């Protein structure tokens, strides 16, 4: 398969532009503006980007710009740059993103990263580099988290990542298999992928609407190594992958998506939770880790591998030890049933129930888009430079909703919806 000219690639581009972004006639598009852990576009993804750009112009965009990068330059910098220089960050990429948002433009980020690219480099330097980048992108991320414009984050295979997932295949075959996998989980193989996505998003929306009607004050999450109570913010809203910008444009923030999610209360999380899938943090794979919460904050952590990287993540800032999201995903989701760990948050989070350390989304609370930072904090929302999802779900997990009267009812049993 020559993916650059395949029908699957064209259908994927159509899904990205029409479902992910829902790009409007006359709306500008910036591809590659960094948002939290996602950077600019790797050069090797040019065939995909060309297909996206062509589709964007076909729907009526007057201007599409792309921010390119060579990811290997990060490793080159860590190896050769002077000691103490890793706080230096060029902010032109983030300022470009702000300019597009301020003019009502859409933002697309492509998450394709070699999970082992920065392995072997000084973890402190890696953490500093990533931390400074997160500080620079924070104003842009805050706007996107408030739904200022329609935006989307998608996935695409790159060198290094491909070899990690398919180590026993020749490079060309591995690349083709990986692209085929992406097309499958992103519904690009459907005869009418846009219609397939509309049906899928409608089903997710029904789940979110049902949860919104029930108005739980907390969720009880149990499973092997997990016994956690997650208090929910008053006026919390459940959302699915289908969102709406402040201008009323519907969009899908992540492609793929299988979740419904809401906002925990920053100070009302207690118990212990154990991960069910690895998490890549600054080039280090953190495995089988557990977090103990008290009064909403992580007070203890353990990991069989990558404990130092996990600790660095928790020490990012004041809000990094509290939760910004809880999401429910059935164990029967297509990504879960693939049986693969992708070492990529955007894919792996759609295989299992998950939590996110760090920044909460303001659109997950009634009136949140209009809240100031102080008002969001007073309501119980968490703020941080990070938003890092980690997977906790499995076929052995149960979730109960706790009503305002203290009565509990089952939401999930053995990893599947109970209603």
Image (cartoon, rainbow, N blue to C red):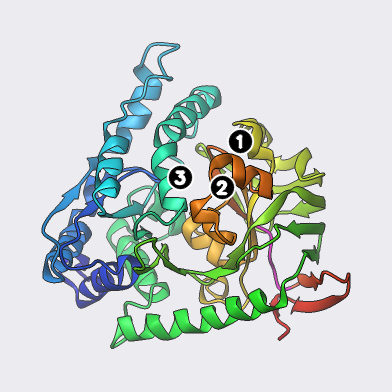
Report crowding for label 1: few under 14, some 14 to 19, many 20 or more residues within 10 A (C-alpha): many
Which label sits on residue 313?
1
Vertical arrangement, residue 174 with respect to residue 304, above or below: below
Instruction: Estimate the spatial distance between the alpha carbons at disc 3 and disc 2, rounded to whole Å.
Output: 15 Å
Residue 299 figure quarter: top right
The residue closer to the viewer here, 258 or 107, is 107
Counting residues from the start of the chain, the first of labels 3 and 2 encountered is 3
Query: Does the stretch in magenta take in 350?
Result: no
Q: Alpha-carbon distance for marks 2 and 1?
A: 9 Å
- Residue nearest the viewer, comparing 409 with 212: 212
- Percent of width and height locating residue 201: 45, 79
Residue 399 lies, in percent from the top left, at 77, 71
Q: Which segment is the magenta one?
A: 391-395
Q: x, y percentage for residue 9?
A: 23, 70
For the residues marked 1 and 3, what is the alpha-carbon distance in whole angstroms? Answer: 19 Å
State left or right for residue 368 relative to residue 9.
right
Residue 409: x and y in percent read 82, 78
Instruction: Quickly name the residue at label 3.
Output: 142
The answer to whether mark 2 and mark 1 are in CB contact below 8 A is yes
Q: Which residue is mark 2?
A: 388
């Amino acid at each position: 398969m020559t993916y650059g000219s395949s029908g699957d690639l064209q259908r994927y581009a159509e899904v990205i532009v029409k479902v992910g972004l829902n790009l409007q006639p006359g709306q500008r598009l910036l591809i590659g503006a960094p948002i939290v852990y996602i950077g600019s576009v790797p050069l090797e993804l040019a065939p995909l980007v060309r297909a996206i750009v062509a589709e964007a112009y076909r729907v009526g965009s007057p201007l599409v710009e792309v921010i390119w990068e060579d990811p290997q330059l990060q490793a080159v910098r860590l190896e050769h740059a002077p000691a103490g220089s890793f706080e230096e960050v060029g902010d032109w990429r983030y300022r470009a993103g702000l300019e597009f948002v301020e003019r009502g433009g859409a933002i697309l980020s492509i998450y394709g990263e070699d999970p082992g690219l920065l392995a072997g480099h000084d973890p402190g330097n890696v953490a500093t580099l990533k931390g400074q980048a997160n500080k620079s992108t924070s104003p842009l991320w805050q706007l996107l988290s408030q739904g200022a414009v329609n935006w989307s984050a998608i996935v695409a295979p790159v060198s290094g990542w491909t070899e990690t997932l398919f180590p026993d295949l020749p490079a060309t075959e591995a690349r083709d298999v990986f692209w085929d996998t992406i097309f499958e989980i992103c519904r690009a193989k459907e005869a009418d992928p846009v219609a397939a996505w509309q049906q899928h998003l409608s089903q997710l929306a029904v789940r979110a609407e049902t949860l919104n009607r029930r108005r739980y004050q907390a969720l009880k999450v149990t499973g092997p190594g997990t016994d956690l109570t997650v208090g929910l913010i008053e006026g919390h809203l459940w959302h699915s992958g289908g969102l709406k910008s402040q201008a009323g444009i519907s969009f899908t923030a992540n492609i793929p998506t299988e979740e419904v999610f809401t906002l925990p209360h920053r100070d009302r999380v207690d118990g212990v939770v154990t991960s069910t899938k690895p998490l890549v943090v600054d080039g280090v794979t953190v495995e089988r880790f557990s977090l103990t919460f008290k009064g909403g904050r992580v007070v203890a952590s353990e990991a069989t591998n990558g404990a130092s990287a996990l600790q660095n993540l928790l020490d990012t800032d004041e809000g990094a030890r509290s939760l910004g999201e809880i999401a429910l995903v059935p164990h029967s989701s297509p990504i879960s049933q693939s049986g693969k760990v992708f070492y990529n948050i955007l894919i792996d989070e759609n295989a299992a129930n998950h939590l996110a350390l760090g920044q909460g989304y303001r659109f997950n609370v009634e009136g949140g888009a209009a809240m100031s930072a102080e008002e969001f904090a007073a309501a119980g929302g968490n703020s941080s430079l990070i938003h890092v999802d980690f997977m906790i779900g499995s076929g052995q997990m149960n979730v109960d909703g706790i009503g305002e009267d203290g009565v509990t009812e089952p939401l999930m049993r053995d990893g599947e919806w109970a209603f």
